Amino acid sequence: MNKIIIHGRLTKDPEQKTYGENKILCSFSIASNESKDHTDFFNCTAFNKTAELILQYFKLGKEILVYGKFKIGSYEKDGESKKSYKVIVNEFDFCGTKEDNENTTQATPQATAPVVEEDDEDLPF
């Protein structure tokens, strides 16, 4: 079983990309404070409806709780094999105080986005 849950804040606005035929994804990074003196950073990718909702409701600094799976990839750079680490987001929850969420539109969706399962073969990496 491969499940990961991360709570943190976006380090920049989510970036939208397209792949396949009219499919979208968004990439973003989350800073999660493990302790007062240590912060971990996670690269995240969401697909289709989940990506659309994150793009619509989340910006730099916004607090989020993501549920997904941890993926390890590999690539070549300067003749060396490198590894990449990414969280594939299946669900998310809104977090934070009412004041934090005042800048979102009034039509906020359910607290949890629908689960979107992607076949690993379909993913663009």
Image (cartoon, rainbow, N blue to C red):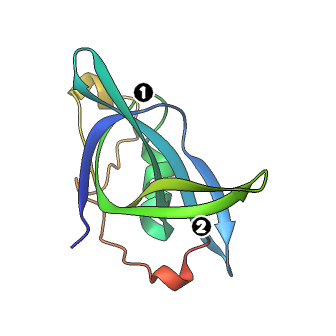
Dot 2 or dot 1, earlier in sequence: 2
Q: CA distance from mark 2 to mark 1?
A: 23 Å
Q: Tell me the residue at 66%/76% (across/down).
A: 22
Q: Is residue 105 left or right of residue 91?
A: right
* Quadrant position of residue 103: top left
Q: Is residue 116 above or below residue 101?
A: below
Q: Tell me the residue at 47%/41% (across/down).
A: 29
Amino acid type, mark 1: Gly
Label 1 crowding class (10 Å Cα cut-off): few <14, some 14-19, many 20+?
some
Amino acid type, mark 2: Ile
Pointers 2 and 1 in contact (C-beta within 8 Å): no
Q: Tell me the residue at 42%/27% (across/down).
A: 61
List the single residue furthest toward the front.
80
Q: Is residue 110 left or right of residue 105?
A: left
Residue 91 seen: no
Quadrant of the drawing holding the C terminus: bottom right
Q: Is residue 125 above or below residue 108?
A: below
- Where residue 120 sits: x, y (%)? 47, 80
- Where residue 77 sits: x, y (%)? 74, 53
Residue that carries the numbered disc 2 in the rendered image: 24
- Where residue 95 sits: x, y (%)? 23, 38
* Quadrant position of residue 20: bottom right
Q: Which mark is residue 13?
A: none
Q: Is residue 40 left or right of residue 3?
A: right
Is residue 116 or residue 119 the one in the foreground? 119
Is residue 121 or residue 57 the one in the foreground? 121
Could you tell me which secondary element the residue under label 2 belongs to?
strand
Q: Is residue 120 left or right of residue 110?
A: right
Label 2 crowding class (10 Å Cα cut-off): few <14, some 14-19, many 20+?
some
Q: Which mark is residue 61?
A: 1
